[in-house]
Image (spheres, grey):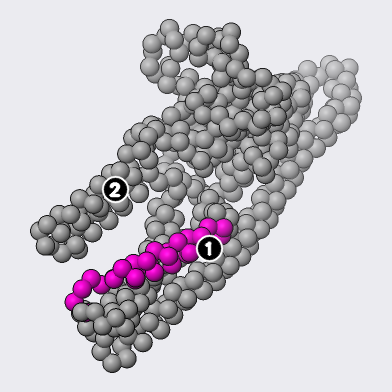
């Protein structure tokens, strides 16, 4: 909110107690939506409608501008609330948050922000559960006089299961972060063990006591808190940017080796008996080695962070150049096609002269043949799909190409002459989606070929686009990223659509099921 003054209302991701997502982002309801949801109990029909009405196709994983947010959790800018007014008391139930979102949306942006979450009492039972497990395991080991190794392993396994169950990022990232934290604690633990041995030697205490005396425990906790405070700023800024960057996560596949190596080194350094540290100059060497490992750990992390940031920036620039070249190619193709249509219209005068000459000569057979050839050469770009000329030209171009290859093409466009989004972004999205659909249809059996596009404007500031096409074979997808069928790399078209949607504050999703590939895009103005 502080970084974007145009945002007036934010809602986080809301989870059920079991971690499932609550679908609370909605389009502004129409009377038909409300009647169907309330009085028509056909589950298949309601499921299809809710997929669009509740924006379920977005998977609720990306930040997006939504016209209607739930009133269960609203973070509103005070000055915006003063202009729009609070909840209208004339609404008895259910519709007051719709009305407030509509009024705020006229003044500012209403944003769904999934990086912040509100879990239905998840933390309320998670913290007591872990505390009870730790305390109960410790008391059981104390009463039975047993080793704490098995108890620690059980508690660690439970913590790992709960940690992965509540993840909102990939397992590679979360696992690497967990290993990094454990590596720091392992280094501090080794240093605290050396401090405890030094205290025991100076106070001449028996060496068969606990590994960490009271003074060493205080030292351990003090150092841990100092490290937490020192790491807070970089963790919430530079590291957070890397964690939230889903497009350039290749470094996370390598980084986990570094903290794991430090953990293994610290485990290897643990002496079997406490008295070993009191032998000769072992303690001095242990202190130097533990301190060096801790310093090297921080140095390696800092160097890796700088390297990863630089590599990610370079990768981002390379992809930006790819997108620019791809967009330029799309524009060149569209400009060439439109120029061909204009040239055909310009040559119409000469065609009419020829037709007039054949008509005057009474040569009907040659006249019919000439007319047929002339019509077949003119690209069919003048079909009217909607009032917006840019969208009409793009869809008309690909419709003509589909008809040329005998691919059924259905278009339902309800777009006004002036759109709430940038027409260039809209044309790029349409051309990418339709070109992918056309290429997939050409590789499909002729009796199954089909392309269907739907586009409409919702709430005067949101453009919804959906393209469906049949396909044969397998979809080359890896970790949610679609690979190109023409070359061994990620599909540039889908990446471009995703990037444009995110740039406008919208979202996109791509699904494939039962031989049908579906692309749904939401662009915000």
Outermost residue on the front side: it is: 203
Residue 220: in magenta span? yes
Q: Can you see residue 269?
A: no
Res 144 quadrant in image: bottom left
Residue 275 on image: x %, y %: 22, 83
Instruction: Give the alpha-carbon distance from disc 2 to disc 1, as whole Å.
Output: 26 Å
- Tell me where residue 349 appears, x and y as whole percent: 89, 27
The residue under label 1 is 230
**Residue bounds of the magenta highlight:** 207-234
Q: Residue at left 38%, top 13%?
A: 42
Q: Tell me residue 229's x, y (percent).
A: 51, 60
Is 173 in front, or is 129? Answer: 129
Q: Is residue 134 visible?
A: yes
Identify the main secondary structure in magenta: helix
Q: Which residue is mark 2?
A: 130
Q: Identify the secondary structure beneath mark 1.
A: helix
In this rendering, is residue 257 above or below 432?
below
Is 290 displayed left or right of 427 in the figure? Answer: left
Q: Answer with the quarter of the image where residue 310 lies.
A: bottom right
Label 1 CA crowd tier, 10 Å (few <14, some 14–19, many 20+): few
Residue 515 sits in quarter:
top left
Q: x%, y% of residue 336?
A: 76, 41
Going from N to C along the chain, the mark reached first, 2 or 1, is 2
């Amino acid at each position: 909110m502080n970084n974007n003054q145009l945002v007036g209302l934010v809602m986080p991701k809301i989870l059920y107690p079991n971690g499932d997502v609550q679908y609370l982002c909605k389009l502004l309801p129409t009377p038909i939506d409300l009647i169907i949801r309330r009085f028509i109990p056909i589950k298949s029909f309601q499921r299809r409608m809710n997929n669009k009405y509740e924006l379920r196709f977005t998977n609720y994983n990306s930040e997006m501008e939504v016209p209607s947010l739930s009133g269960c959790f609203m973070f509103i800018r005070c000055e915006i609330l003063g202009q729009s007014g609070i909840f209208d008391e004339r609404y008895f139930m259910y519709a007051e948050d719709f009305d407030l979102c509509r009024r705020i949306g006229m003044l500012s942006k209403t944003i769904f922000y999934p990086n912040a979450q509100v879990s239905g009492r998840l933390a309320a039972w998670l913290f007591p559960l872990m505390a009870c497990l730790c305390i109960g395991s410790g008391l059981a080991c104390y009463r039975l006089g047993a080793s704490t190794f098995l108890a620690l392993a059980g508690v660690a396994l439970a913590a790992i299961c709960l940690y992965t169950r509540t993840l909102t990022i990939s397992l590679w990232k979360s696992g690497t972060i967990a290993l990094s934290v454990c590596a720091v604690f392992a280094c501090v633990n080794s240093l605290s063990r050396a401090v405890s041995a030094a205290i025991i030697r100076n106070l001449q205490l028996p060496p068969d006591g606990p590994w960490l005396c009271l003074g060493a425990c205080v030292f351990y906790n003090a150092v841990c808190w100092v490290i937490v405070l020192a790491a807070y700023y970089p963790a919430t800024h530079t590291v957070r940017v890397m964690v939230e960057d889903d497009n350039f996560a290749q470094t996370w596949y390598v980084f986990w080796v570094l903290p794991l190596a430090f953990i293994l080194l610290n485990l290897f350094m643990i002496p079997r008996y406490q008295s070993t540290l009191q032998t000769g100059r072992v303690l001095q060497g242990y202190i130097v080695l533990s301190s060096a490992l801790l310093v090297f750990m921080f140095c390696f992390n800092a160097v890796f962070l700088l390297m990863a940031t630089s590599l990610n920036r370079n990768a981002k620039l390379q992809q930006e150049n790819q997108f620019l070249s791809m967009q330029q190619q799309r524009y060149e193709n569209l400009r060439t096609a439109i120029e061909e249509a204009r040239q055909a219209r310009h040559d119409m005068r000469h065609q009419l002269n020829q037709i007039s000459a054949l008509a005057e000569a009474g040569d009907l057979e040659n006249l019919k043949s000439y007319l047929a050839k002339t019509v077949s050469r003119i690209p069919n770009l003048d079909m009217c799909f909607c009032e917006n000329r840019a969208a009409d030209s793009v869809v008309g171009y690909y419709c003509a190409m589909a008809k040329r290859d005998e691919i059924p093409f259905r278009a339902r466009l309800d777009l006004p002459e002036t759109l709430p989004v940038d027409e260039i972004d809209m044309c790029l999205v349409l051309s990418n989606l339709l070109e992918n659909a056309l290429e997939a249809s050409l590789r499909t059996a002729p009796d199954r070929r089909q392309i269907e596009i739907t586009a409409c404007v919702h709430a005067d500031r949101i453009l919804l686009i959906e393209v469906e096409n049949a396909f044969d074979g397998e979809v080359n997808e890896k970790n949610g990223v679609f690979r190109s069928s023409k070359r061994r790399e990620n599909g540039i078209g889908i990446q471009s659509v995703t990037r444009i949607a995110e740039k406008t504050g919208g979202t996109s999703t791509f699904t494939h099921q039962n031989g049908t590939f579906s692309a749904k895009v939401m662009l915000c103005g």
